[in-house]
Amino acid sequence: MEKKQIRSVGIVVKPNHSEAAATASELAVWLRQRGIGQLGEPISADTIKPENDRTLDADLVVVLGGDGTMISAARLVGEQNVLVLGINYGSLGYLTDFRIEEMFPALEAIVSGQYEIDRREMLTAEHWRNGEKLVSGRVLNDVVINKSALARIINIDVKLNDLFVNTFRADGLIVATPTGSTAYNLSAGGPIIYPSMTAVVMTPICPFTLTNRPIVVPDDALIELTLDNENEGVVLSLDGQTGYPMLAGDRVVIRKSTTTFNLVQPANRNYFDVLRDKLKWGR
C-alpha cells in the first residue's frame, strides 16, 4: 500500500466505555485543529453486525477499545485499503497495539507518512441451505461450527478445492486466519501462525478420534464445510459475535477475502513481544 495523505478519519469505540468515549471527543478536537475531516459521530462497535453492509470511506479508522472492538471494525473497511490504528482499552490487546499515551504521537507520525503496515488476511464465509444463501460475512479471526453443551457429537464433512478431506466427528470445527490463531484456535489446541503467513488452519474442537489434528492449508483454498447429521443446537459463528442455527445438509463456503486488514504497527514492538506479554512466556 502506498503511503496516503490522511484527509478523513472514522472512529470506532468500545460500547458503554466512558474513557473511550472521552478519548473520542479529544480526538475529534485534534482532527479539527489540523483540518482533517471526521466521518460522522463515533461508531459503537455493538452496532456493527457480522453480515454488515456498511463501510467507512475513510483514509484512517481509529479504534478505541479491545480486540473485540477491532474485530467489529474490520467489517467496516469495505474494499478500500483503509489504515487502522488500534488504541488498547481492552484486556488482551493482540490487535490494539498502541497504549492511550501513544495515540497522538502515533497520529502525528501517520499524518506525516512515517508508519509501517501489518497486513492481516481476512476470510469471507457464506451459509447455504437448499441452494439458498442465508448469510454472508467477512471475518478477521475465525469461522466456527460448534454444538451446544447438551447436543450430540456432530459430523462435519470437509472439502478443500472440491477434494474430500475428512469427516470430522467432534464438538465443532474452527477455520482460523493467522490473526485468529491466537484466539479460539489456540484454546482448542491449534498452532500459533505468524500473522504474515498465507495460511488458514482448520482445528477440530474436542474430536472423537484423537488422530484428527489441526490442518494448515493455503489461504487461497476454497473450503466447504457440510453438517452431516441432524442435531439440535448446532451454530455457525462469525468471529464469535453472532450465531446462525444450522440444520443437517447446510453448507458453509469459506474463501480468502479480497480485502486485507491494514494495521498500523508500532515501531518499538514486534509480534513476539506481544506473544511473550499476552501468553506469559517465561513466567
Image (tube, rainbow, N blue to C red):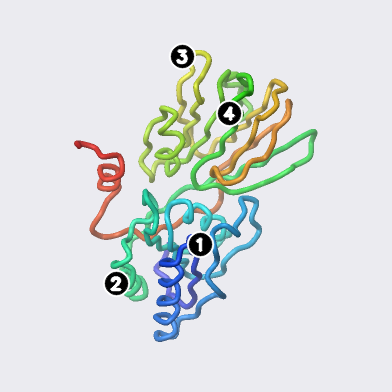
Rendering quarter of residue 264: bottom left
Q: Secondary structure at mark 3?
A: loop
N-terminal of the two: label 1 or label 4?
A: 1
Q: Nearer the viewer, mark 3 or mark 4?
A: 3
Q: Are marks 3 and 4 in contact (CB under 8 Å)?
A: no
> Residue 125: x percent and y percent?
62, 42
Q: Which residue is mark 1?
A: 16
Q: Quadrant of the N terminus?
A: bottom left
Residue positioned 39% across, 54% down in the render: 90
Name of the residue lying farthest toward the left: 282
Q: Nearer the viewer, residue 22 or 98?
A: 22
> Residue 279: x percent and y percent?
30, 39
Q: Nearer the viewer, residue 25 or 127?
A: 25
Q: Quadrant of the C terminus?
A: top left
Q: Secondary structure at mark 4?
A: strand
Q: Residues within 10 Å of mark 1 (few under 14, many from 20)?
A: few
Q: Nearer the viewer, residue 225 or 45?
A: 45
Residue 211: image tag? 3
Q: Which residue is mark 4?
A: 160
Q: Secondary structure at mark 2?
A: helix
Q: Please say if 214 is above or below 44.
A: above
Residue positioned 41% across, 27% down in the render: 189
> Residue 197: x percent and y percent?
39, 41
Residue positioned 43% across, 41% down in the render: 178
Report the Cα–Cα distance between label 3 and label 4. Answer: 19 Å
Q: Secondary structure at mark 1?
A: loop
N-terminal of the two: label 2 or label 4?
A: 2
